[in-house]
Each structure stands twice: as C-alpha cells, then as structure tokens.
Image: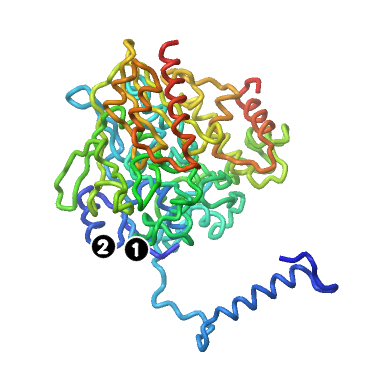
Amino acid sequence: MKAFTYERASDPAAAARSVASKPGAKFIAGGTNLLDLMKIEVETPTHLVDVQDLDLDKIEKTSDGGLRIGALVSNTALAADQRIRRDYAVLTRAIVAGASGQLRNKASTGGNLLQRTRCPYFYDTNMPCNKRKPGTGCAAIGGYSRQLAVIGVSDKCIATFPGDMPVALRVLDAVVETVKPDGQRRSIPIADFHRLWGDKPEQDTVLEPGELITHVTLPRPLGGQHFYEKVRDRASYAFALVSVAAVIQPDGTGRVAFGGMAPKPWRVAEAEALLPQGAAAVTARAFQGATPTKDNAFKLPLATRALASVIAQAKA
Amino acid sequence: MSDFIEPGVSRRGVLAGSVASVAIANAPSGANAQTPPRASEPPAMPVNLTVNGKKHALRVDTRTTLLDTLREHLRLTGTKKGCDHGQCGACTVLVNGQRINSCLSLAVMHEGDEVTTIEGLGTPEKLHPMQAAFVKHDGYQCGYCTPGQICSAVAVLDEIKAGQPSHVQADVSAKPAFTAAEMRERMSGNICRCGAYSNIADAMADVAGVKA
C-alpha cells in the first residue's frame, strides 16, 4: 500500500474542500472497497479524509412522506430500519443479498453507491485496463468476460456496476444529495448518478472532484410487492451474475431494474411498461441492442428467467 | 518445467537457483543493489484503542490495518490473517459490539473504539459458551479460521436476537428465527477450507438452544 496522510473531518463542506484542495485525496467511510483496492495499489490516494464523524448517520422523514437516509447509515442499519423493511422492502432485500454480515456492518450508504467494478482485469495491475489506467486498453474485451456487461458498454470498457443496493434505489427513484467544496448542494436523480463508460471509463459517476454524498432520499412509498431476485455462483456472499429489483402492483404493472448487466443499474421505462405481457416482453425491450460476448450471452436468457420467477411469485 | 532433475539436485534448489539468476539478469547494469534511503518516513499517527478491556495508546503508520495492529503491535495473534481482502472472515473481531473484517479497516479509523478479539471472549480456564460449543461439536479441523468463526458466531446470535433481517427470510419485515438456514446464511462471510461447516452450525444451534 502506498503511504498516505489521514485526517478526520468534522463538517461535510470542510471535508469536500479538503479533498478538492489536495491532489490525490479521497474520502473514506467504511473503507471496505477502498482499502481492498489500496492494498493492491489499484487505488493510491495520497491523503484520506475520514468522514465517519459527520452527522450523516440518521434516517429521517421528509415533508412529502419519503425518507432521507444519511450517507453514513451502514448497510446493516439501513436494511434493519422498520420503515425501510415495511415500505421499501426491495431495498432491505437488495442490501441483505449483498456482501457478508461483517462487510454490511462497515459499508455505508454513500460508499455503496461508489463501489467500483469487480472486473478481474481492473483488479489485475499486470493487465491493461482503461478504467484503472486510462489509455492502456481493455483486456476484458476478447478476454474472460463471463461476469461482465452485455449492454451500455463501449469499445473502451465492458465492466459492470457490481452493487445490489443501488439497483433497488433505481427502482425506487431515489435522489442522491451532495455538497460541493464551495458549500453548494445538489440533488442527482439515481438514474443520472452512474455513468455509461463511453470514452471515460475511469469516471464511474457524475460526481465532481471533492463532491461528497451527504444523503439519499426516497420518495413516498410505492406500495405493491417488493422483490430482489439475485442469481449468483453460490447461494450467499457472491456478486450478482444477474439481479432483478422489482415492485409489482396488484394489477400486474410495476417497476423493474436489473443488476449485473450494465455499467449502471439498468431500468428502461418502455420495457417495464410491458410487465403485464410477461418477462420475455420486458427483457426483449430492456436489452434491445445488447452486445453480449460468447462468455456472457447466458445473462440475457437468465435475466428473463429471473424476472419470470419474480412475476410468478407476485401472482402466487 | 521438466520433471527430470539431476540426482542430488532438489527441485527446490533448482527453483531457487532459477529465481536468483532471473533477478541478476533483470538488474540494470551499474545499478546500486542497495535499497535507496527513504526521502522521508511514512506518515504515522497516534491512536487509542481499548482491546479486550485494556487501554492502549499506540503510534502507527497510517497504513496499518486493525488486524496488523492487533497481531503485530499488541501481539494478540488469536485473530488470523487469511486472505487480507475481506473475503474469508478469518480476521473477524467485534468493534463496539459489531463484527467486522479487521483486515479492511485502518487502525487510525478506530480512535476510542472498543475491540473484542477471541482472546477477550473467554480464557482456556473459562471458555465463552461459543468456544465450549465449538470444542464439544468439533467445529474445526486445522483451527485457522476458528477465531473468526467464533467471533462471527457470537455476533450472529446477537443479530438474530436484535431482529436484523436476512436474505433467507420470506418476509423481511418479520422477526427472524434461530433456524439453521438463518445461521448458515449469516455465517457466509466466514470460509472454512477444512469444511467444518455442519459442526459449526451444530455448535451455534447448541448455544442458541435450538435444534440444528
């Protein structure tokens, strides 16, 4: 691990200023993803601003009947909150489908949104990777791509966003609230938060340098039945090959987003409008124009089957 | 590599010899073989921890993980380093009552925290009930993952008691029960390469007072 200096911030805007003013500085909250990457020198921050003391660890009601989740609320605390379990069960289900108990105790709401890809070539510093080292090329294209994305990819990068929680947040139309180094605040709809790789795979999100996530806001509850169907190589503690977050209403309409398929949680309005017609209709539209490799083409029928399972459970 | 090795030459000797010759071949001519002196010492900071009820004032390189602090600075070697990447759970300890992977946390992030390691759960004379149950049910073979398994198992029973939801619940708004399925799911962050899982599950069920 490269040497770095360390400070604990006491105010969100000051934390943002500190990261913005020091080249190579990064925020650290739970650290479960960042420290893993620092050990193999995929991440090499020169300064860490620890945000754990900030007053961002509460879940509060909003005036329009939703909830405002502090960025430091742990995955464990968020999943266990009675309001989340009752009114936003898709979120609890997505969180408890991810990682392990130990990791969820440390992982934060803000950090989970910033989780970096698990592409094996991103992790292997002996291989070219445009995301890790811009301009070096992509070893995944033409390489071992079983876990990688089938849609939203570019000729620079075919990595997926690996997380579960943000797939549920996408279905719930959550909003990410931030503070910038100049103290200005902004609200970013979750749909716009993660980027498609395009020519800049090194940039995972639309956050600007030093911009700090402070809250994630959920609109008022949707009702309906909530599902998070995750298909993976083992029954627990593995990243999704394919996941489906869905809220299904009694009349068969609803919302659906997919994980493990793209650089971001994948939700297509025209596709979910086809829910009453069945899973195949939805996925045909959602993954129109997909460019799978021979290794990951299985994800397309798997997504249809995972959604079919959700629809069957909703009808049962 | 060929399986044929001259009599009297061990495979290990051949391998070591090849590594050495590669190292020589790669050294730039005229380069100084000595490690250059550091321009400056890497940043270090003070940190105060309470471990197993005992207060410690330490000064550590900022890069030092909680795991290495416990093992190398405090000589509490019960906590094990397995993968060092949060994938195996061998380093599991309790921090302020919650289980975490001590390998994925920096010591400097734990100013003022209370840490409980396997050494703090029980002693050879007075075992923690979970330690005694692991002995009774033969919940290990080589024992390397065991301290992490036991710390995790103790926390898992607390988490179920506190009503924390899990992936195997049919209804996540309900209170979870002390079932084998619940305990197995919640222990998935602790890998046992010897495969003592069924006995670990028996030990946990015994402490929880249920049938495995």
Whether residue B55 is visible to the viewer of this picture, yes or no, is no
For label 2, the crowd category at 10 Å Cα-Cα, with few meaning under 14, some 14 to 19 and many 20 or more, is: few
Q: Residue at x 46, y 41 (%)?
A: A103
Which element is circle 2 on? loop
Mark 1 in CB contact with mark 2 (< 8 angstroms): yes
Chain at numbered mark 1: A
Of the residues under marks 1 and 2, which one precedes in the sequence?
2
Q: Position of residue B21 (x, y in %)?
A: 64, 78
**Which quadrant: the N terminus of chain A?**
bottom left
Residue that label 2 marks: A22
For label 1, the crowd category at 10 Å Cα-Cα, with few meaning under 14, some 14 to 19 and many 20 or more, is: some
Q: Is residue A82 above or below residue B110?
A: above
Circle number at residue A46: 1
In the picture provided, is A18 more to the left or to the right than A104? left
What type is the residue that disc 2 sits on?
Lys
Residue B72's image quarter? bottom right
Q: Position of residue B22 (x, y in %)?
A: 61, 76
Indicate how the structure is coloured in the image. rainbow
In the picture provided, is B14 more to the left or to the right than A124? right
Q: Residue at x 58, y 57 (%)?
A: B75
**A291 or A106: nearer the eye?**
A291
Residues behind callouts 1 and 2 on a single chain = yes
